Amino acid sequence: MGEKTRYSDEELEEFRQIILEKLDKAKKDYELLKSAITQSESNDTQDTSPTFKVLEEGASTLSKEESGKLAQRQLKFIQHLQAALVRIENKTYGICRETGKLISKERLRAVPHATLSIDAKQRQK
Protein backbone atom coordinates (compact mmCIF):
# COMPACT_ATOMS: atom_id res chain seq x y z
CA MET A 1 0.00 0.00 0.00
CA GLY A 2 1.29 3.48 -0.89
CA GLU A 3 1.58 6.61 1.16
CA LYS A 4 -1.61 7.97 2.74
CA THR A 5 -3.09 10.85 0.80
CA ARG A 6 -5.62 11.97 3.44
CA TYR A 7 -6.61 11.37 7.04
CA SER A 8 -9.37 8.88 7.82
CA ASP A 9 -12.79 10.05 8.97
CA GLU A 10 -11.93 8.95 12.53
CA GLU A 11 -8.72 10.99 12.47
CA LEU A 12 -10.58 13.97 11.02
CA GLU A 13 -13.13 13.71 13.83
CA GLU A 14 -10.32 13.79 16.40
CA PHE A 15 -8.98 16.98 14.80
CA ARG A 16 -12.50 18.43 14.63
CA GLN A 17 -12.83 18.03 18.41
CA ILE A 18 -9.44 19.69 19.00
CA ILE A 19 -10.41 22.59 16.74
CA LEU A 20 -13.85 23.01 18.32
CA GLU A 21 -12.28 23.21 21.79
CA LYS A 22 -9.73 25.79 20.61
CA LEU A 23 -12.46 27.71 18.78
CA ASP A 24 -14.63 27.86 21.89
CA LYS A 25 -11.73 29.18 23.98
CA ALA A 26 -10.68 31.63 21.25
CA LYS A 27 -14.19 33.07 21.03
CA LYS A 28 -14.32 33.53 24.81
CA ASP A 29 -10.92 35.25 24.76
CA TYR A 30 -12.10 37.48 21.90
CA GLU A 31 -15.19 38.53 23.87
CA LEU A 32 -12.98 39.37 26.87
CA LEU A 33 -10.76 41.52 24.68
CA LYS A 34 -13.77 43.26 23.15
CA SER A 35 -15.15 44.05 26.60
CA ALA A 36 -11.72 45.38 27.65
CA ILE A 37 -11.77 47.74 24.68
CA THR A 38 -15.26 49.02 25.41
CA GLN A 39 -14.56 48.85 29.15
CA SER A 40 -18.12 47.78 29.76
CA GLU A 41 -17.20 45.91 32.92
CA SER A 42 -14.49 48.08 34.44
CA ASN A 43 -13.96 51.46 36.00
CA ASP A 44 -12.85 54.30 33.79
CA THR A 45 -10.89 57.45 34.57
CA GLN A 46 -14.14 59.10 35.64
CA ASP A 47 -13.78 57.83 39.20
CA THR A 48 -10.19 58.98 39.82
CA SER A 49 -8.92 62.28 41.13
CA PRO A 50 -8.09 64.99 38.55
CA THR A 51 -4.36 64.80 39.35
CA PHE A 52 -4.05 61.31 37.89
CA LYS A 53 -6.65 61.71 35.19
CA VAL A 54 -4.22 62.70 32.40
CA LEU A 55 -1.86 59.81 33.18
CA GLU A 56 -4.76 57.38 33.49
CA GLU A 57 -6.23 58.44 30.14
CA GLY A 58 -2.88 57.93 28.41
CA ALA A 59 -2.49 54.48 29.93
CA SER A 60 -6.10 53.69 29.12
CA THR A 61 -5.63 54.65 25.46
CA LEU A 62 -2.48 52.55 25.22
CA SER A 63 -4.25 49.63 26.86
CA LYS A 64 -7.17 49.93 24.44
CA GLU A 65 -4.77 49.97 21.47
CA GLU A 66 -3.02 46.84 22.73
CA SER A 67 -6.35 45.14 23.37
CA GLY A 68 -7.46 46.13 19.88
CA LYS A 69 -4.39 44.53 18.32
CA LEU A 70 -4.87 41.40 20.40
CA ALA A 71 -8.55 41.27 19.44
CA GLN A 72 -7.62 41.51 15.74
CA ARG A 73 -5.12 38.66 16.10
CA GLN A 74 -7.69 36.61 17.99
CA LEU A 75 -10.30 37.19 15.28
CA LYS A 76 -7.81 36.09 12.62
CA PHE A 77 -7.07 32.95 14.68
CA ILE A 78 -10.82 32.23 14.88
CA GLN A 79 -11.12 32.60 11.10
CA HIS A 80 -8.20 30.18 10.57
CA LEU A 81 -9.84 27.63 12.87
CA GLN A 82 -13.16 28.00 11.04
CA ALA A 83 -11.37 27.50 7.72
CA ALA A 84 -9.80 24.33 9.14
CA LEU A 85 -13.30 23.04 9.96
CA VAL A 86 -14.30 23.64 6.33
CA ARG A 87 -11.24 21.66 5.20
CA ILE A 88 -12.33 18.81 7.48
CA GLU A 89 -15.78 18.87 5.85
CA ASN A 90 -14.14 18.80 2.41
CA LYS A 91 -11.78 16.03 3.59
CA THR A 92 -8.77 18.13 2.54
CA TYR A 93 -7.69 18.84 6.12
CA GLY A 94 -4.08 18.04 6.98
CA ILE A 95 -2.81 18.15 3.41
CA CYS A 96 0.09 20.55 2.87
CA ARG A 97 -0.91 23.21 0.35
CA GLU A 98 2.62 23.30 -1.09
CA THR A 99 3.78 19.69 -1.14
CA GLY A 100 0.41 17.91 -1.26
CA LYS A 101 1.64 15.50 1.41
CA LEU A 102 0.07 14.91 4.80
CA ILE A 103 1.05 17.27 7.59
CA SER A 104 2.21 15.30 10.63
CA LYS A 105 -0.36 14.62 13.34
CA GLU A 106 1.97 16.13 15.95
CA ARG A 107 2.06 19.43 14.04
CA LEU A 108 -1.72 19.46 13.58
CA ARG A 109 -2.30 18.76 17.27
CA ALA A 110 -0.04 21.70 18.15
CA VAL A 111 -1.26 24.01 15.36
CA PRO A 112 -4.64 22.63 14.21
CA HIS A 113 -5.13 25.33 11.58
CA ALA A 114 -1.78 24.61 9.87
CA THR A 115 -1.88 24.41 6.08
CA LEU A 116 1.84 23.79 5.58
CA SER A 117 4.05 20.90 6.63
CA ILE A 118 7.08 21.78 8.72
CA ASP A 119 9.34 21.27 5.67
CA ALA A 120 7.26 23.65 3.53
CA LYS A 121 7.12 26.20 6.37
CA GLN A 122 10.90 26.13 6.80
CA ARG A 123 11.40 26.59 3.05
CA GLN A 124 9.36 29.79 3.21
CA LYS A 125 11.88 31.44 5.54
Image (cartoon, rainbow, N blue to C red):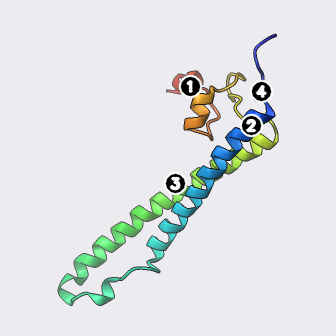
Question: In this figure, which residue is indicated by the disc labeled 3?
Answer: 73
Name the residue located 35 percent from the left edge and 83 percent from the top edge. Answer: 44
Q: Residues within 10 Å of mark 2 (few under 14, many from 20)?
A: many
Q: Quadrant of residue 51?
A: bottom left
At which x and y percent is residue 118? 56, 25
Q: Amino acid at mark 2?
A: Leu
Q: Earlier in the sequence, mark 3 or mark 4?
A: 4
In this rendering, would 111 be left or right of 85? left
Callout 2 secondary element: helix
Residue ID for mark 1:
118
The residue identified by callout 2 is 12
- In front: label 4 or label 2: 2
Label 4: which secondary element: loop
Q: Which residue is mark 4?
A: 6
Q: CA distance from mark 3 to mark 2?
A: 26 Å
Left/right of residue 64 with respect to residue 56 in the rendered view: right
Q: Earlier in the sequence, mark 4 or mark 1?
A: 4
Secondary structure category for the residue under label 3: helix
- For label 1, the SS is helix
In the image, is residue 76 above or below residue 1? Answer: below
Q: Image height check: is 90 above or below 48?
A: above
Give the residue type at disc 3.
Answer: Arg
Q: Residue at x 47, y 80 (%)?
A: 40
